[in-house]
Image: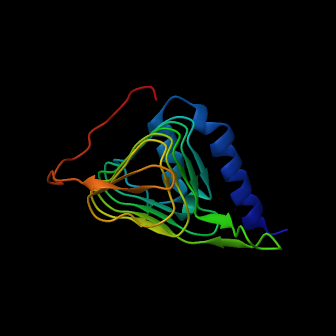
Amino acid sequence: MNIKLWGGAFLNYFYNNLLTHFPSHFLRKAFLRAFNKNIDRSAVILMHSRFLNFWEIEIGERVVINQYCLMDCRRFKIRIKHDTDIGPYTKIWTLGHKPNSETHDLYGGDVIIDHHVWIASNVTLLPNITVNAGAIIAASAVVHKSVGPSHIVAGNPATFIKERVNPLIYKLSYNPILE
């Protein structure tokens, strides 16, 4: 077996089964940044969040990833731009199976989340989509296609509700001590 493959598997295991449960987002982020400089220093990653191949994720300035999120970067990338808030229990998938395939074939693609996006709790983002700037995704939505700029979507499957009208000038500021 390839040593790089084994090393990556060990790093994933160490983070996802041990370090993610330690109550210090500074320590967790320091570990992730040691292997991936595309995670901004100002990002906040709360406890119990899991990353599959964390070296394939880009996290921008002041991004907040809440508890129990799952980020799947096994074959494709996740890009999260600045001032984005991702609610607890959110799952972002870049890889899935074709439902009508007789051989359970894989499909996938990058997931791109633009700036000033608010993803509420328990949302599922499926592969190969873009969530454009200022979008809001309501709790428990399942997003299977790209979301337009400043669109508010909800439901399963996620559908357009209305457009967000506030200016996208805020800067997230969240610094928990023990999370």
Q: Is residue 155 above or below residue 77?
A: above
Q: How is the image coloured?
A: rainbow
Horizontal relation, residue 151 to residue 146: left or right: left
Horizontal relation, residue 152 to residue 46: left or right: left
Residue 149 placement (x, y as % from top left): 28, 64
| Residue that extends furthest to the top in the rendered view of this protein | 178
Count of marks, rendered view: 0
Residue 171 placement (x, y as % from top left): 21, 47
Q: Which quarter of the picture shows residue 79?
A: bottom left
- Quadrant of the snapshot with the N terminus: bottom right
Q: Residue at x 31, y 48 (%)?
A: 62
Residue 8 placement (x, y as % from top left): 69, 59
Q: Residue at x 14, y 54 (%)?
A: 167
Horizontal relation, residue 157 to residue 146: left or right: right
Q: Residue at x 38, y 63 (%)?
A: 147
- Along the line of sight, the residue nearer the viewer: 147 or 1: 147
Residue 53 placement (x, y as % from top left): 62, 59
Q: Is residue 102 above or below residue 71?
A: below
- Along the line of sight, the residue nearer the viewer: 119 or 175: 119
Q: Is residue 148 above or below residue 47?
A: below
